[in-house]
Image (tube, rainbow, N blue to C red):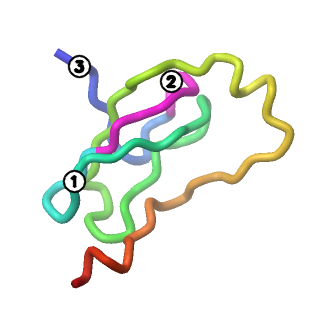
Amino acid sequence: MALLHKSSSIIPESGIYRVTHSQHRLPHEVTLIGGQTFPPCGKCHEEVRFELVRELPDLERERRGHVSLYSLPVLDEEDE
């Protein structure tokens, strides 16, 4: 069984994570950096889970600039 992480928990390792929302959207993937926190969703807030799909250990060393993801955005087409 896969290890699922909750929003606001510390990201254990850099990598690509599958994001599963409570009800409003299909799973998708996002790249996250270890040591930061898993972001909440702009719509379902803390009702989102993260599962590591692929580790990217070099991501932390090789990044020259980065953007911290404080909240997963709600896409416009979801409202239609």
The magenta span reads 11-19
**Residue 10's spot in the image, x, y percent?**
50, 34
Q: Earlier in the sequence, mark 3 or mark 1?
A: 3
In three-dimensional space, the C-alpha distance between marks 2 and 1, rounded to whole angstroms, equals: 24 Å
Going 38% across and 47% down the picture, which residue do you hit? 7
* Residue picked out by circle 2: 12
Point out the tag, 2 or 1, that comes first from the N-terminus. Answer: 2
Give the CA distance from mark 3 to mark 1. 18 Å
Left or right position of 80 against 29: left
Residue at the image position 65 percent from the left and 52 percent from the top: 68
Kind of residue at disc 2? Pro
6, above or below 79, in the image: above
Q: Count how many numbered circles sit on residues in the image.
A: 3
Q: Front-most of 69 and 54?
A: 54
Residue positioned 34% across, 37% down in the render: 18
Residue 28: percent from left, percent from top: 33, 47
Q: Are marks 3 and 1 in contact (CB under 8 Å)?
A: no
Q: Secondary structure at mark 1?
A: loop
Q: Around disc 1, counting alpha carbons within 10 Å, would you say few (fewer than 14), some (14 to 19), or many (20 or more)?
A: few
Q: Is residue 17 magenta?
A: yes
Instruction: Give the left or right position of residue 32, taking residue 4 as reference.
Output: right
Task: Indicate which disc, 3 or 2, sits on the residue closer to the N terminus.
Answer: 3
Instruction: Please tell me whether residue 7 belongs to the stretch shown in magenta.
Output: no
When the figure is inspected, residue 5 is found, relative to residue 22, above or below; the finding is above
- Which residue matches tag 3? 2
Q: Quadrant of the C terminus?
A: bottom left
Q: Secondary structure at mark 3?
A: loop
The amino acid sitting under disc 3 is: Ala
Snapshot quadrant of residue 63: top right
Q: Position of residue 54 (x, y in %)?
A: 45, 21
Residue named by callout 1: 26
